[in-house]
Amino acid sequence: MFKLPKENSAARPSSLGRRGFLIAAAGTGLTLAFLRADSTLAAGQAASAPPKHSAAPVFDPSIWFQIGRDGMITVNIAKAEMGQHIGTALARIVADELEADWSKVRLQYVDTDPKWGVMVTGGSWSVWQNFDPLSRAGAAGRLALVEEGARLLRVPVSACHARLGVVHGRGRSIAYGEIVRRGKLARRYTPQQLKAIVLKTPQQRRLIGQSVQALDIPAKTNGTAVYGIDAHVEGMLYARPKVPPTRYGSKVVSIDDSAAKKVQGYLRSVVLQDPSGTVPGWVMVYAETYAAACRAAELVQVKWRAGAAAHVSEQDIVSYASKQLADASLGARVVDDEGVEQAFKDASLKLERHYTTSTVLHFQLEPVNALAQEVDGVWHIHAGNQWQSLILPVLAQALKVEQDQVMLHTYLLGGGFGRRLNGDYCVPAALAAQAVGRPVKMICTRADDARFDSPRSPSVQHVRMAFDADGKVSAMVHEASAGWPTQAMIPALLAKDKQGHPYDPFAIAGADHWYTVGAQRVRAVSNDLANSSFRPGWLRSVGPGWTNWAVESFMDEAAQAAKVDPLAFRLSLLQATGRNAGSAPNAVGGAARLAHVLRRAADKAGWGTAMPPDTGLGIAATFGQERDMPTWTACVARVKVDRSTCMVRVERLTMVIDAGTIVDPDGALAQAEGGALWGLSMALHEGTAFLNGEVKDTNLNTYTPLRMADVPELDIEFVVSTATATGMGEPPTTAVAPAIGNAIFAAVASRVRHLPIRPEAVLKGLDRHGAV
């Protein structure tokens, strides 16, 4: 059962490391009780019940892994795999402490069950949260195996050690699989005993930080990997939705399916009745095949009475945000130091700038889809999902059943980027199946997916800075208005400021930066017009995708106003004192580590050297998602601007990242490369707008992400560190756009303050002589 934390400080899901576990022999029937995301579903088998097997011994030291009689080690992964190799990373953590033979490790992506705790994959949390509990689970398993191995070898435990899945002692050895077959494994660990286990030192690790084969690559390359869109059960129907003109408030007036009846395989069209309010006004078009469902859906004519958002445009949302920020009484003060007003009153120099960002869509490769089937009173939902615990209670409400009557089956995700944190697409599939009493697979087309997306909200930000008589920064104010994803989807997890005002940390994180700026204020305002017009969603980097754009663009503008080099200006503010000193265990070193990656990136990129005409270097930094889990990242962008067209060409991105301990080097590099290119794509190419309550762009002919021809040279370096492992999914994304914007100014003295950066905005910053 998904239970919300009592305190907002615990908004992110807790790990399971606080509870103990029993090490004992069990039957394989228990270990296989949760169906895997494998080829059984693709072969047309319904998810009715787990297979039954004879009770052969299996070593099950915790819910996180099992060792079979053949010595094969199965690591249970309760996270979503969407290309980030999270299974490989988490399995490495277990296997290193377990002293496993990596060639005998396999992954099992588990389906929903209360024992997994809160199931969510996002926020760059997975490795950070699970490093310690998985390490202790692996170590506990190793200790128990060594003890039992010693007994079987008739050698003192003190004389034994484990290596590569084998226990050695006084010239004798026994493999883990044989210990499972012959041994009497029975050991119980309390939480205190688990905590007391002495883990390996970084120097003793054999898998973490080393180059090994990612376990998910073979299946992805030979075509056997199963994604949600591949799910199949016998007797299922296909369905495609008719998506209403507004996310909220739409009601069906009439349906005319006369033309659709000519399509072979078309069955009927049904208005979904949704007690959860997730998909109001949806019409589902059923057919025997997906092709027939698509053709029929184009012919079905639906008349709706649209909701209030039908009159809302992007400009309305932006204008409303600006009015909100002008009212100082609105929102929450996330940071609120004394002396802000006095510092501005006494300032010898004041600077104020406004920054905006457009609506951004996810456009993941695999459009959202779900297959729903009811078997013996239990609803089985087959879909790739990032936050199963969020959608389970919604599904139960929609279907009018208890939550334990709903199971989500896990599949690989053909791209997530935060879209599948919101599992709303599971609801119409379930309701469609319930309405006809048969299994139904709903697949959205690319256009359906775009219209039903939970996009990144447009944002408006006002940033101010005060300098004292000595030219030092004495105060800084950062105010931001945007749609709040957490408010839209799980308001119980909103944080609160000191006065008790709620705010969405995912809509303001990043504004609470690590620069020492004197008296500081950060204010977050919920754009309720955005919230009521569409469902704001989490998109890779979330709040820092816009807050870091403002912070790092403004730092360059402040350096210009102070007549100081942008790098030198930043370094002067990274003092690592007060709240910016950092703290254990995640932020040891604080701002000093951010200063280090800035210096290193600048040095690698040739900061300060002469550039060719109309070419410039721009620098930016970020700490990633949240202050209590910082991934220190610096980026230098080298860009060339064509003065005749004002087209911007990014030639090179130099990035230095301090993420503490790197568990999976290849996976971390892939994350950094993907994040950097995603940041570049949103900086120059991606962005849409709301028009009459709907997004303007619904396919890739007009919504134009980064193309291969525009990919720059990437130079990415990781700081060698033994510090706490922090997140890699999002931090590399956020520093790219401001680095590009700052580089444009360095190249042609044109300042841009809106994302995405269009040629007309660059042109606007130039006069006929090419100067501001």
Image (cartoon, rainbow, N blue to C red):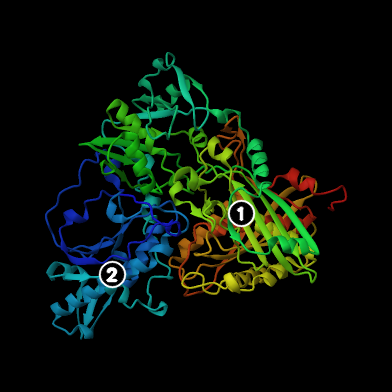
Q: Which residue is drawn at 73% across and 63% down?
A: 342
Quick check: can you spot residue 493?
yes
Query: Identity of the amino acid at label 1?
Result: Arg
Q: Which residue lies furthest to the right in this view?
A: 769
Residue closest to the eye, 41 or 692: 692
Count of numbered circles in the view: 2
Residue holding disc 2: 191
Q: Position of residue 452 (x, y in %)?
A: 49, 35
The amino acid type of the residue labelled 2 equals: Pro
Mark 1 closeness class: few <14, some 14–19, many ≥20 residues within 10 Å: many
What residue do we see at 73% from left, 45% from top? Answer: 759
* Residue 523 disc label: 1
**Residue 284 in the image, given as x and y percentages of width and height:** 40, 26
Indicate the quadrant where residue 381 lies: top left
**Percent position of residue 424, x then y:** 42, 39
Between marks 2 and 1 in the image, the one whose residue lies nearer the viewer: 1
Q: In which quarter of the image is residue 126?
A: bottom left
Q: Could you classify mark 2 by the number of other residues whose Cα lies within 10 Å: few (under 14), some (14-19), or many (20 or more)? A: few
**Looking at the rendered structure, which numbered label has been put on residue 532?**
none
Q: In this view, does 371 lie to the left or right of 277?
A: left
Q: Earlier in the sequence, mark 2 or mark 1?
A: 2
- Tell me: residue 311, above or below residue 642: above
Residue 682 at what x, y percent from top left? Answer: 61, 48
Residue closest to the eye, 567 or 656: 567
Q: Quadrant of residue 337?
A: bottom right
Residue 100 shows in the view: no
SS of the residue at dot 2? Answer: helix
